[in-house]
Image (cartoon, rainbow, N blue to C red):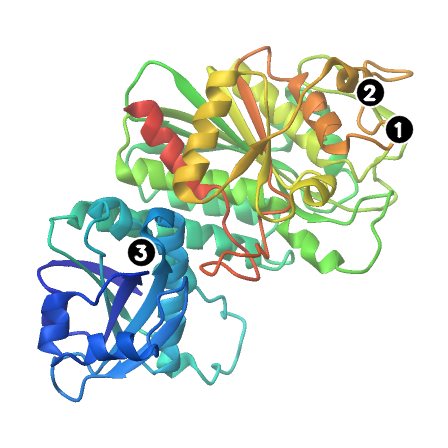
Amino acid sequence: MRATFRRGTPADTSADTLVVLLFDGESAPADLDSALGGRLGKLLESGEAKTANKRTALLHTDGAIAAARVITVGLGKREDFDSERARNAAAVAYRQAADASAQAIAIAVPEGTGQATTGAALTEGVLLAAYRFDRYKTKADDDDSQRAEQLEIVSNEDIGQAIAESEIIVACQNAARDLQNLPSNVLTPAELADYAIGRAGEVEALEAEVLELEQLEARQMGGLLSVAKGSHQQPKLIVLRYDGGGTATLGLVGKAVTFDTGGISIKPSSKMEEMKFDMSGGAAAIEATVAIAKLGLPVKLLTVVPAAENMPSGHATRPGDIVTISNGKTVEINNTDAEGRMILADALVYAASEGADRIIDLATLTGAIIVALGSTYAGLFSNDDDLSAAIAAAGDSTGELTWRMPLHADFKELTKGKFADLTNAASARKASSAYAASFLEEFVDEKPWAHLDIAGTAWSQDGRDYVGNGATGWGVRLLVELARGMSA
């Protein structure tokens, strides 16, 4: 689906379906209602068109305007309106239009709102809701022929650049969703590395490098190597570099376990198929980097994605084994299913040693964060108040929300090993997400750092009509917005 912008009045659209967004206690847009012979106003007066949030109604125009139908979507009270409400309303409108077999959709940006911000959010809502992953279906779904191919955003202000930029960002977020949805027999560490190299080749300012097994061994990346030992798939360290200007380098680190069985500490079989999503942090980091580079934002990025498959075998790492991370710290591996922190440890060391001034990592790290925050918030852990505040603000703007969680000296005590410097899994079953974050902090060389635990938001995010059930690509829009803020 493609998005375009038109400056003008909603009634002049050539799309077959026009979406009108309505606030509580406000009348229908006068010019449009006049063009429709007052029928939109009557629909409101009758109560058939409701203004409560996400309530819809359908009006056939009978030739009064070029659009065959008008879909109204309620926004609730104007004082409650924000970009997230716009995204969800746009997604609801898209699905209603699809049910009506719409081929082209126009959405009028409500008057009295920030036109560029709201228009961008409406674009995101539709293009994210229109996402499908069906490349392995040999027969098209029944509704395939009903998919709209064109989105037009209409405003009385020139917001074309905001719409075009939103289209770029959403395309990258949907690409991250594709990566998440790929089966693990297709998306191996090697395939992810090849993919990243290919994406870098699309943007002149973006460089890619992949560290292979011999290089990982030479750098003594014991964490990454230990996780990959049980698999036939060799680990990779994917590195992307983008220099858009600026003085400080932002490091992005994304966990990419392309399949996680738990290793010798094997997981229960129920829903193990979802462990193909354990590379969601890596997908988001790669695609956010691509989006930032395509937008030409004036920032410097160093993106590091450790990729491995966690499998049990005669070669696999055993509980009780001790390995050395590339900064020299030793770790007792007391649970091979606590593998994400192991591969992130080496990636964080690499990012810190290669010049990152601030570091953010994203990982589907702990099930405990889902218990704490559900699928509404990602857990945010940080050693730096300014960085934490910037991430939280970017999340509020994009709807990819974060909630800051504590780091405390008590949690640091849990990370201490009995026979080595650290243990990757404490025997005490408490503060699991905070413990994991405290473990990661050991590898950032005291640089400003934040950890985003996205286990609850990476897929099946409740309450988000624009992503719904399935892969979300969570983090792409947040990281782009963060980069915008840092470059301002």
Q: Is residue 211 visible?
A: no
User: Which of the numbered marks, if any, corresponds to residue 184?
Assistant: none
Residues 211 and 438: in front is 438
Q: Report the amino acid beneath label 3.
A: Leu
Q: Pick the residue in front: 485 or 320.
A: 485
Q: Nearer the viewer, residue 236 or 215?
A: 236
Residue 370: image location, x then y, percent: 69, 45
**Residue sitting farthest toward the bottom:** 62
* Among the two numbered marks 3 and 2 on one chain, the one whose residue lies closer to the N terminus: 3
Element marked by disc 2: helix
- For the C terminus, which image quadrant? top left
What distance separates the C-alpha of mark 3 from that of mark 2?
Answer: 45 Å
- Classify residue 33 by image quadrant: bottom left
Report crowding for label 2: few under 14, some 14 to 19, many 20 or more residues within 10 A (C-alpha).
Answer: many
Q: Which residue is mark 1?
A: 428
Q: What percent of the width, then of the height, locates residue 267?
A: 83, 50
Q: What amino acid is labelled 2 in the image?
A: Leu
Question: Label 2, on which residue?
Answer: 414
Q: In the rendered view, does 18 fall on the left or right side of 455?
A: left
Q: Residue at x 32, y 31 (%)?
A: 484
Q: Which residue was labeled with disc 3?
A: 122
Q: CA distance from mark 3 to mark 1?
A: 46 Å
Query: Cβ–Cβ below 8 Å for labels 1 and 2?
Result: yes
Amino acid, disc 1: Ala
Across and down, in percent, residue 137 comes to 53, 76
Residue at the spot 48% in from the left edge and 31% down from the top edge: 392
Residue drawn at x 41%, y 58% as measured from the top left: 88
Crowd class of label 3 (few under 14; some 14 to 19; many from 20; radius 10 Å): many
Tell which tag, 3 or 1, sits nearer the viewer. Answer: 3
